[in-house]
Image: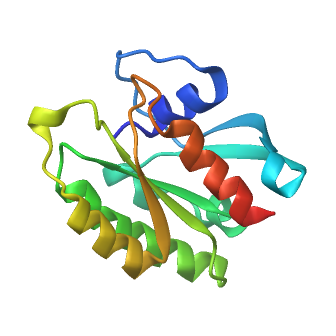
Amino acid sequence: MGKTSLVRQFVEGLFNDEYLSTIGVKISRRTVELPDQNAKANLLVWDLAGGDDYSKVTSGYLAGASGVVMVCDLTRKNTLQMLEIYARQLDKVSKKNLPKVILANKVDLTTDRQITEEALNLIGEKLNANWFLTSAKTGEEVEKGFTQLAELLI
């Protein structure tokens, strides 16, 4: 899906196309300037294992979350459906309505795209989340997506 690549693009401004699966959790940090709110947000980004490994992530990682960036892969339709499962699990653990942002990744792979903007609108409404068409490779909309979450948290 590209969660780790998106986080790396956001935190370090780097992209590496070598695939490395996240095992457990990786924590990164970045300060975001929010000029409209005359504020700064210090984000601790927890990159959790997804896919089949997501169910193995302990609820302790999720319980302290303040907000969520959820990722789907525009070239794999099933990843959109997984967002609902992840959101339900998160809602059970957090017991609060966390701010959510959806990053629909791999917008640069136009010929391989399987998820429509209409489908993103539907899931966005269902999860009460804004979505962004992103590319970890080019950096497109990555900053915007994470900044949107920071704004929701302030």
At x 26%, y 55%, the residue is 79
Is 130 or 69 nearer to us in this picture? 130
Is 116 or 43 nearer to us in this picture? 116
At x 75%, y 44%, the residue is 44
Quick check: 76 left or right of 133?
A: left
Picture quadrant where residue 54 is located: bottom left
Q: Position of residue 117 (x, y in %)?
A: 25, 59
- Label tally: 0
Q: Is residue 111 above or below residue 86?
A: above
Quarter of the image with the C terminus in it: bottom right
Quick check: 94 left or right of 18?
A: right
Q: Position of residue 120 (x, y in %)?
A: 30, 64
Q: State whether residue 66 appears in this view.
A: no
At x 64%, y 57%, the residue is 149
Q: State whether residue 140 appears in this view.
A: yes
Q: Position of residue 129 (x, y in %)?
A: 49, 69
Outermost left residue:
111
At x 76%, y 35%, the residue is 30
Q: Position of residue 11 (x, y in %)?
A: 65, 29
Quarter of the image with the N terminus in it: top left
Q: Is residue 92 above or below residue 33?
A: below
Is 136 or 20 nearer to us in this picture? 136
